[in-house]
Amino acid sequence: MECVIYQERTGECEQIDCRQQDGSCQATLERLAGLEQGEFAWIRMDEPRQEELQRLGEYLKLHPLTIEDAVQAHQHPKQERYGDVLAVAVKTLWFVEQTADVETGEVMIILGRSFALTVRHGPDDPTVEAARRFSQEPQMARLGPVGVLHAVTDVIVDAYADAAAQVRTDLTELERSVFSPARDDLTEQIYSLKREVVEFRDAIQPLVPVMQPLTTAREDWPRQVVPYFRDVTDHLTRTDTEVRALDDLLTSVLDAHLAKVGTWQNDDMRRISAWAAIFAIPTMVAGIYGMNFSHMPELNWRYGYPCALAVMALGAGLLYRAFRRNGWL
């Protein structure tokens, strides 16, 4: 757990040692009790224990449902308000290039009048980058705790855009492979990428209605924060539109690939049928002359055997030529 105290007017910050040797958050509670006018605290927690968040939540007067959501970390993007406390759950996304997988996590951002609490779950931690930006832009500290909400959501939405660009790159490569002359079965790869896009879509689409209300002025928030949230929401909406387009395009690519696989199978069946028809003529002639009747034409003829072979070869050759002309072979 990390805690930084910001001075809204100057943007100056003070980082404090949050945990005692016993792992408690007593130092944080004592410093929060000593906050002066114009100061607010940003508390960052990574996969906290139930008792640790419970104690901090009791001090900050958090609703029990907020604490439960922050600990469990299996929430859809949402916005909940309990009195003066606003809780926003956001899914984090990042693209793993080695496996071409889209991994997800979660950040719960809880805002009060004098504090911002972020609870992170998953390997990716957007609050690190958000804190870096926050420290480099003193004007964000002047926005108070709501500035933390903007900084964290801005980093997360930027990660969405980066992941969408990388997914589009993988999709472009799949398209080239699907329409190449090579006969590679890409069905599993297409399904795998589509599954990742669906996971991407499930994370980003519910966040759009969550962010929309933040683009309008609120009585308890500084008015100058509205343009920042409009910018984040605009980026989010564009990425959401791109993800929808990627999902639709993947469906089209899958349909095209399945049609191509069907064409391969039809070609194979035509070839098999053509060769079966070609070999049917020698088989038929050989079968007739292999019935061993006493009185059969050409049995005693000197050129009967070569003639039978010639008929087999001629019939097979004519069929082969016909099938080649019609594209079956």
Image (tube, rainbow, N blue to C red):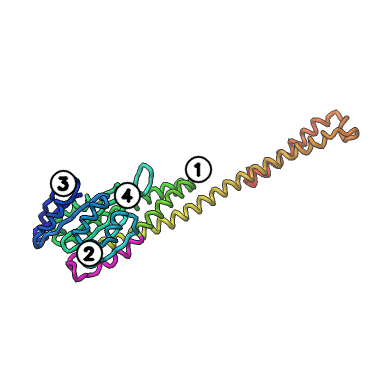
Position of residue 14 measured from the top left corner of the image (x, y, whole percent): 11, 52
- Residue under numbered circle 3: 20
Under mark 4, the amino acid is Trp
- Residue under numbered circle 4: 94
Contact between labelled residues 1 and 2, with CB atoms less than 8 Å apart = no
Q: Secondary structure at mark 4?
A: strand
Q: Which mark is residue 85?
A: 2
Over which residues does the magenta segment extend? 205-225
The residues tagged by marks 4 and 1 sit, at their Cα atoms, a distance apart of 29 Å
Under mark 2, the amino acid is Val
For disc 3, the neighbor class at 10 Å (few under 14, some 14 to 19, many from 20) is: few
Under mark 1, the amino acid is Asp
Q: Which mark is residue 207?
A: none
Inspect the magenta stretch and tell me whether residue 85 lies in it: no
Position of residue 243 measured from the top left corner of the image (x, y, whole percent): 37, 57
The residues tagged by marks 2 and 4 sit, at their Cα atoms, a distance apart of 29 Å
Q: At 22% across and 58% down in the image, what residue appears? A: 57
Task: Name which quarter of the figure residue 233 lies in.
Answer: bottom left
For disc 1, the neighbor class at 10 Å (few under 14, some 14 to 19, many from 20) is: few
- Residue under numbered circle 1: 184
Q: Secondary structure at mark 1?
A: loop
Q: Nearer the viewer, mark 2 or mark 4?
A: 2
Q: Nearer the viewer, mark 4 or mark 3?
A: 3
Q: Nearer the viewer, mark 1 or mark 3?
A: 3
Q: Is residue 216 visible?
A: yes
Sequence-first disc among 2 and 1 = 2
Marks counted in the figure total 4
